[in-house]
């Protein structure tokens, strides 16, 4: 699940464990995670029945250039390479993209890192690709002499997780934000799913994480009303519906998350759950969004937006 976070936030920006800030180690970690995935698929297939399905989940970035300029298009290409194709390339296509190798050749010797047989191991076929999506990634070429904007949504650090792309600036897609300071943009999920369907038409997809954190609280009547989350879920479920209508083979959707829980380095401060958790008493209170979502599941119908 989310090897990009483990590699790039753990070894690049250092906001997650093990807290290192070594660009070369970031790329080595990404390759070793890819290799571990391939070896795990082989191990699972050797003991599970043929009907069992194997997969992994990637938090793919729906990358957009800020403007139509060639410089911003180049920034988007670089971030797509180090944010997405460093995993989809070897896992789905059996090779690391040539532009990624060129972008990062000054940091690591790929010929020494990737051993004979690694790519065959990594590219063992999977049965479905898990996709995590929360917000789009909007980028531009940084303007020399100005401070680089860092609205990449991945925590505060003086070190960039975007290895080899320090001259790229990040921007919010809009000012409709969650408690994570992530821009709400359901069209990004539709674009991501239809793009994957176009590039890998035979690969089934699964939305394995999608949701939003808001500053939820219990009312004096003992209820948790979260209309923002309902609106978020409605828009993103509609994006999945539209992607399916446009030909994407999406097999399922999972809300992140059932319960408020421990969110990486944010601890218990961010509430993503459809069910509110009172951490002092462990009492569970289904939020308004939980009741709404239950109706969607029960009726298998997405109601009209309110």
Image (cartoon, grey):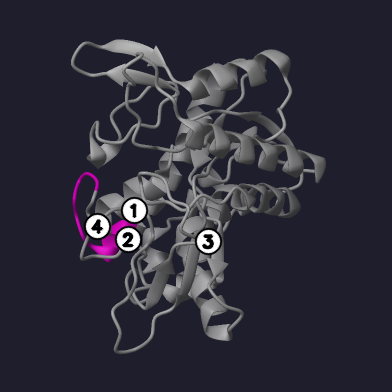
4 or 3: tag closer to the N-terminus: 3
Estimate the spatial distance between the alpha carbons at disc 3 and disc 1, rounded to whole Å.
Answer: 24 Å
Q: Which residue is mark 4?
A: 156
Q: Looking at the image, can residue 31 be seen?
A: yes
Q: Is residue 246 left or right of residue 130?
A: right
Q: Which residue is mark 1?
A: 154
Q: Which residue is mark 2?
A: 161
Callout 4 crowding tier (Cα within 10 Å): few <14, some 14–19, many ≥20: few
Contact check, label 1 and label 2, Cβ < 8 Å = yes
3 or 2: tag closer to the N-terminus: 3
The count of marks equals 4
Estimate the spatial distance between the alpha carbons at disc 1 and disc 2, rounded to whole Å.
Answer: 8 Å
Q: Is residue 196 left or right of residue 209?
A: right
Estimate the spatial distance between the alpha carbons at disc 1 and disc 4, rounded to whole Å.
Answer: 7 Å
Single out the mark in the foreground, 3 or 2: 2
- Give the residue at x 49% y 37%: 228
Considering the numbered disc 4 on the image, is that residue within a helix, a strand or a loop? loop
Estimate the spatial distance between the alpha carbons at disc 4 and disc 2, rounded to whole Å.
Answer: 10 Å
In the image, which residues are magenta? 16-26
Q: Which residue is mark 3?
A: 96
Where residue 293 appears, x then y in whole percent?
A: 58, 22
Q: Is residue 21 magenta?
A: yes
* Main SS, magenta residues: loop
- Identify whether 243 is placed above or below 302: below
């Amino acid at each position: 699940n989310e090897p990009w976070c483990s590699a790039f936030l753990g070894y690049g920006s250092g906001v997650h464990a093990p807290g290192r800030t070594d660009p070369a180690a970031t790329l080595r970690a990404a390759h070793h995670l890819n290799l571990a995935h391939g070896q795990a698929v082989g191990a699972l297939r050797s003991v599970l029945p043929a009907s069992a399905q194997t997969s992994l989940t990637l938090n793919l970035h729906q990358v957009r250039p800020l403007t139509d300029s060639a410089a911003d298009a180049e920034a988007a290409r670089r971030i797509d390479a180090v944010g997405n194709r460093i995993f989809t390339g070897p896992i789905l296509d059996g090779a690391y993209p040539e532009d990624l190798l060129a972008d990062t050749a000054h940091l690591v010797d790929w010929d020494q890192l990737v051993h004979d047989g690694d790519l065959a191991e990594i590219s063992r076929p999977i049965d479905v690709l898990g996709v995590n999506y929360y917000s789009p990634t909007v980028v531009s070429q940084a303007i020399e002499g100005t401070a680089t904007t860092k609205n990449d949504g991945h925590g505060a650090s003086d070190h960039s997780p975007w290895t080899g792309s320090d001259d790229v600036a990040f921007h919010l897609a809009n000012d409709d934000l969650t408690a994570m300071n992530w821009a709400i943009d359901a069209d990004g999920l539709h674009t991501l799913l239809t793009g994957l369907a176009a590039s890998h038409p035979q690969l089934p997809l699964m939305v394995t994480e999608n949701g939003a954190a808001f500053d939820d609280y219990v009312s004096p009547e003992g209820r948790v009303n979260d209309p923002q989350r309902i609106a978020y879920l409605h828009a993103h479920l509609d994006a999945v519906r539209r992607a399916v209508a446009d030909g994407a083979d999406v097999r399922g959707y999972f809300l992140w998350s059932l319960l408020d829980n421990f969110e990486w380095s944010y601890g218990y401060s961010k509430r993503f759950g459809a069910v509110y958790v009172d951490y002092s008493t462990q009492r569970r209170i289904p939020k308004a969004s939980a009741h709404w979502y239950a109706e969607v599941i029960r009726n298998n119908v997405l109601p009209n937006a309110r």
